[in-house]
Amino acid sequence: MTTAIHRLVGELRAGSDLGFIARMSSGWAVMNLRQVLPGTCLLLPDPVVPALNALAGAARLQFLADMATLGDAVQQATDAVRINYAILGNQDPALHAHVIPRYRDELPALATSHPWAYDWTVAPTFDVGFHGELRDRIRAALGGSA
């Protein structure tokens, strides 16, 4: 099965994704296409697997450790008050972790809700001209360069 996650990993392998942040031990850190909250990222495994349960032992631990490390970098780069993590796979049945910063200035009705309470269809699309500096700060917090 080919999913959006498979296609995105293929683009990352080819070096053609502008949202690329870093190659991590378990896969790829990338800016999410929809920046519902600035700094929203994905961690994608390489090779792609259907779900977290498809990884065993060290590979599973590495993916989860990389997810937390990406969260640390996002928090450092954004000054978020917390990071939300989500592994769903309902729309794209391939493992990917959402790493979503949460901010002090969010609307009270949304601040205590899950990130999908936001309207993702109207969220800004990742744009290197607008979000590139934030992407670069996250990359630097991970200790990498382009």
Image (cartoon, rainbow, N blue to C red):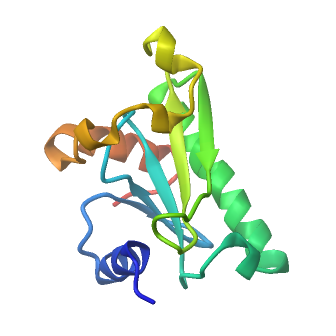
Q: Is residue 111 left or right of residue 20?
A: right
Q: Residue at x 45, y 50 (%)?
A: 41
Looking at the image, residue 97 sits to the left or right of residue 63; the answer is: left
Furthest-bottom residue in this view: 1
In which quarter of the view is residue 11 placed? bottom left
Total numbered labels: 0
Please identify the residue farthest to the right as the structure is shown. Answer: 57
- Residue 134 position, x and y percent, is 34, 38
Farthest residue to the left: give it.
129
Pick the residue in front: 133 or 83.
83
Q: Percent from the top left, x then y, of residue 58?
A: 81, 76
Residue at 18% x, 47% y: name it: 127
Q: Position of residue 26 (x, y in %)?
A: 62, 73
Q: Position of residue 3 (x, y in %)?
A: 40, 79
118 to 28, vertically: above or below: above
Q: Is residue 142 visible?
A: no
Residue 12's place in the image compared with 14, above or below, is above
Name the residue located 62 percent from the left edge and 27 percent from the top edge.
Answer: 82
Q: Quadrant of the N terminus?
A: bottom left
Relative to 24, 8 lies left or right: left
Report the residue at 46% width, 69% height from top.
92
Q: Nearer the viewer, residue 116 or 32?
A: 116
| Rendered position, 21 above or below 117 | below
The C terminus sits in image quarter:
bottom left
- Residue 61 left/right relative to 90: right
Whether residue 122 is visible, yes or no, is yes
